[in-house]
Image (cartoon, rainbow, N blue to C red):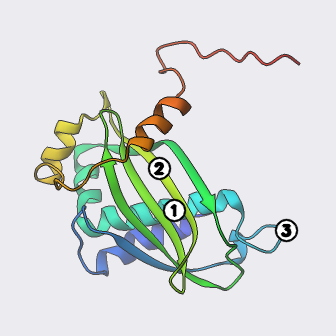
């Protein structure tokens, strides 16, 4: 909810920015706002991931894929994410969110995103996303057809991403996932 107005603004503003291919990198310029910081006076660690949503929206809108997704009734959801911090973004500081599709596996579309200030990476995240329709997950075949063909041949998902996904996955929603901590 805290990014609702910025998201609505982005949905309008990104349509006026230069067009991109879904395989391009997007660069979204922003400034740290008062609602982004925590008591330590820098961007809150959880806020980085929320702000990165805006970067993915920017890429999808500018490539035309957002409109196509909405027409097909597809909704993007995050399945897994990991982030590493290097420096803190401060109130009022200008930065960009750099976003690109890293690759695919049989279950997810993977994004790599950087928070960049003056050419320096402040944070880097890897996000596994899925597209859902009313009948369930959208297959890669449907996604590639919507993209207009297969991804570029040089788009090869790093092996460690496969390992990360396997090692952090929870059971499917059709299987139990009981909580077993002892209190």
* Residue at the spot 72% in from the left edge and 64% down from the top edge: 44
On the image, numbered disc 3 is attached to which residue?
A: 39
The residue identified by callout 2 is 127
- Whether pointer 3 and pointer 1 mark residues with C-beta atoms closer than 8 Å, the reply is no
Distance CA(mark 1)–CA(mark 2): 9 Å
* Residue 160 can be seen, yes or no: yes
In percent of width and height, residue 138 lies at 27, 35
Query: Is residue 1 something that shows in the picture?
Result: no
Which numbered disc flags the more N-terminal residue, 3 or 2? 3
Q: Is residue 150 left or right of residue 24?
A: left
The structure residue drawn at horizontal position 68% and vertical position 70%, both measured from the top left corner, is 36
Instruction: Tell me if residue 29 comes above or below residue 97 in the rendering.
Output: below
Disc 3 to disc 2, C-alpha distance: 27 Å
Q: Which residue is mark 1?
A: 52
Residue 87 in picture, x, y percent from top left: 67, 72
Residue mark closest to the camera, 1 vs 2: 2
> Closer to us: mark 3 or mark 2?
2
Whether residues under marks 1 and 2 lie with C-beta atoms below 8 angstroms apart, the answer is yes
* Dot 3 crowding, Cα within 10 Å, few <14, some 14–19, many 20+: few
Number of marks in the image?
3
> Label 3's element?
loop
Q: Is residue 121 above or below residue 84?
A: below
Q: Earlier in the sequence, mark 1 or mark 2?
A: 1
Rounded to the nearest angstrom, the CA distance separating label 3 from label 1 is 21 Å
Describe the element under mark 1 as helix, strand or loop.
helix
């Amino acid at each position: 909810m805290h990014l609702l107005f910025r998201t609505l603004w982005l949905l309008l503003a990104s349509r006026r920015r230069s067009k991109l291919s879904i395989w391009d990198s997007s660069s979204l310029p922003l400034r740290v706002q008062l609602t982004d910081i925590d008591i330590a006076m820098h961007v809150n660690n959880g806020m980085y991931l929320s702000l990165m949503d805006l970067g993915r929206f920017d890429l999808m809108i500018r490539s035309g894929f957002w409109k196509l997704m909405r027409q097909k009734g597809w909704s993007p959801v995050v399945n897994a994410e990991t982030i590493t911090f290097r420096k803190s973004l401060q109130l009022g500081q200008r930065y960009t969110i750099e976003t690109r599709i890293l690759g695919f596996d049989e279950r997810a579309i993977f994004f790599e995103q950087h928070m960049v200030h003056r050419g320096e990476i402040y944070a880097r995240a890897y996000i596994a996303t899925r597209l859902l329709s009313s009948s369930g997950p959208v297959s890669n075949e449907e996604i590639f057809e919507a993209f207009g063909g297969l991804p570029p041949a040089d788009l090869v998902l790093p092996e460690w991403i496969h390992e990360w996904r396997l090692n952090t996955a929870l059971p499917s929603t059709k299987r139990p996932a009981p909580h077993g901590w002892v209190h």
